[in-house]
Image: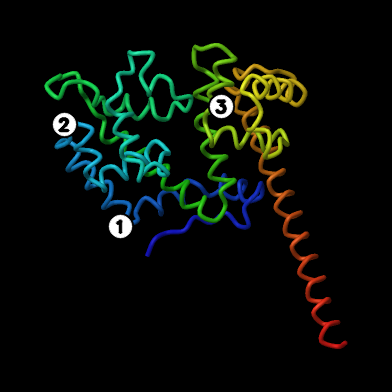
Amino acid sequence: MSYNIHVGNGGYLGWKILERTSEAQKTAFSKSAELQRSRDYFVENISKVQSAEDLIGDYKLLSVALRAFGLDDDLNNKFFIRKVLEANPQDENSIVSRLPDKRYANLNAAFGLWHSSSDDTNTLDAEAITDMFTTRSFEKNIGAQHQEIELALNAKRELAELAGSNISNDTKWLRIIGSKPLRKVFEGAFGLGQNFAKLPIDRQLSEFKAKAERLTGSSDIGQFTDGEQVESLLKRYLLRTQIDSSTNTSKFSTALTLLSAGRSRSLLS
């Protein structure tokens, strides 16, 4: 039987429950037989992979690889993933260089399959990838019931890394805009509606920076190297998500009550 992570009813309260219990729950989760089988299969068979085609052709290996980088949704996009794996990251015009979501660049870099198979510079850290797979699987387990906490966990990890990177502030914002998981957290925390993503990219960039300036006092992504700033952002996101969820539930309950009342009157008339 698989282990299900306990986070109560989710939202910010669920986040605080997870903070107190995460180590114990991660330990229990990592002992899952299904998880261990996937890890073992990857470690035992990844050395046989000499090309992108080899990886794409092994569903079990590909499943672990994509989950490790948070790319589960691309499991059936094999043609696209093959192009990503085979792209030369040193070519600024290659697909992996042009994609705004840098998870694909990270996947490409980890496997190095754009090199010649005879190139002995191809080194793969199988243990690091299986550890990432376990972490993402833990988050995915939570996300099955409470996606907001899965997204918050992802943001806590990736935002600190992005904030400390040696690129311009605008480039950092553009990477957030290009990453679906990260942008969902920022859109939620800043109270931006569903139509926001339809705006031109330059408009989104200016709006994100203006919102950050008003809410945090700075539009500099570098501020999120500070754990307290990250926690403040995630708290805002989780509380807003919780409020929106409660509002939608109340609207549904009200509509159901009115519908039931209408049916009762029809039966009595």
In the rendered structure, the answer to whether residue 126 lies left or right of residue 174 reads: left
Q: Is residue 59 above or below residue 205?
A: below
Image position of 178 (left or right of 69): right
Counting residues from the N terminus, which is met first, the one under dot 2 or under dot 1?
1
View extreme (bottom): residue: 268
Query: What residue do we see at 49% from left, 16% from top?
Result: 165
256 lies left or right of 224: right
Image quadrant occupied by the C terminus: bottom right
Q: Residues within 10 Å of mark 1 (few under 14, many from 20)?
A: few
Q: Position of residue 164 (x, y in %)?
A: 52, 18
Q: Are marks 2 and 1 in contact (CB under 8 Å)?
A: no
Q: Nearer the viewer, residue 172 or 193?
A: 193
Q: Is residue 111 left or right of residue 106?
A: left
Residue highlighted by disc 2: 50
Residue tagged 1: 33
Using the numbered discs, state the Cα–Cα distance from disc 2 to disc 3 in whole angstroms. 33 Å
Judging from the image, what secondary structure is the residue with disc 3 in? Answer: helix
Give the mark, 2 or 3, whose residue is nearer the N terminus. Answer: 2
Q: Secondary structure at mark 2?
A: loop
Location of residue 252 with respect to 134 vertically, above or below: below
Quadrant position of residue 199? top right
**Gap in Å between the C-alphas at discs 3 and 1?**
35 Å
Identify which amino acid the numbered label 3 is placed on: Ile
Give how far apart the Cα atoms at labels 2 and 1 are. Answer: 28 Å
Indicate which label's residue lies in the foreground, 2 or 1. Answer: 2
Q: Residue at x 29, y 42 (%)?
A: 62
Residue that numbered label 3 is attached to: 176
Name above or below for residue 141 compared with residue 93.
below
**Of residues 24 and 178, which is closer to you in this image?**
178
Q: Quadrant of the N terminus?
A: bottom left
